[in-house]
Amino acid sequence: KSIDFSISCYAAFLKQHPEIDSKMVIVGKGPDVDDLKKLADSLKIKDKVIFTGPCSPSEVQYYYTLGKAFVSASLTETQGLTYMEAMAAHLYVLARYDHNLLDVIQEGTTGFFFENEEEFTDKLYKVYQLYINKNMEMLDQALKSIDHYSIETFYKRIIGAYKHVIKQCW
């Protein structure tokens, strides 16, 4: 999931904006957790990065409520479900650019893409500005954009499909 890249980008952000009090929360535990902790230590940000360890799927939603932004540098997403979950939780979304996410994130409207530390730093600062200025437009747009993935919309589509099939067969 390129968490090492996210940590390095966050370190660059902190270096450029030491006046901003923030934390990075990493939820879960993978085989690289010890190396990631060492990376945070070597970048001198171990006090700014919290590793929660594993959690059950039913607990993930609670971690979303802790944040103001969701960051992922993953280049292996196929559907963007975690991004949609973050949008549903009313978080600003920063994603490493991946063409698979173009249907989920509209740059500058529902979230931001970054490709390197400099872009990450600039975009996270924009998110910070949106947050402190209580600008909710991006969060509202993001929430609207994922509506067609909601369970209610899925239900309406599946019922429509069933009705269509029934009509064709009768």
Image (cartoon, rainbow, N blue to C red):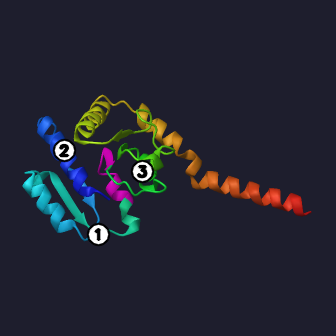
Tag 3 near tag 1, CB within 8 Å: no
Q: Which mark is residue 54?
A: 1
Q: CA distance from mark 2 to mark 1?
A: 22 Å
Image coordinates for residue 73, horizontal then vertical, percent:
32, 51
Seen at 14% across and 35% down, the residue is 16
Residue 122 placement, left or right of 75: left
Local crowd size for mark 2, using a 10 Å CA cut-off: few (<14), some (14–19), many (≥20): some
Image coordinates for residue 35, horizontal then vertical, percent:
16, 65
Q: Which residue is mark 3?
A: 83
Residue 57 vs residue 114, the one in the foreground: 114
Q: Which residues are magenta?
A: 61-71
| Three-letter amino acid code at the position of disc 2 | Ser
Q: CA distance from mark 3 to mark 2?
A: 21 Å
Residue 52 placement, left or right of 160: left
Q: Earlier in the sequence, mark 3 or mark 2?
A: 2
Residue 33 placement, left or right of 57: left
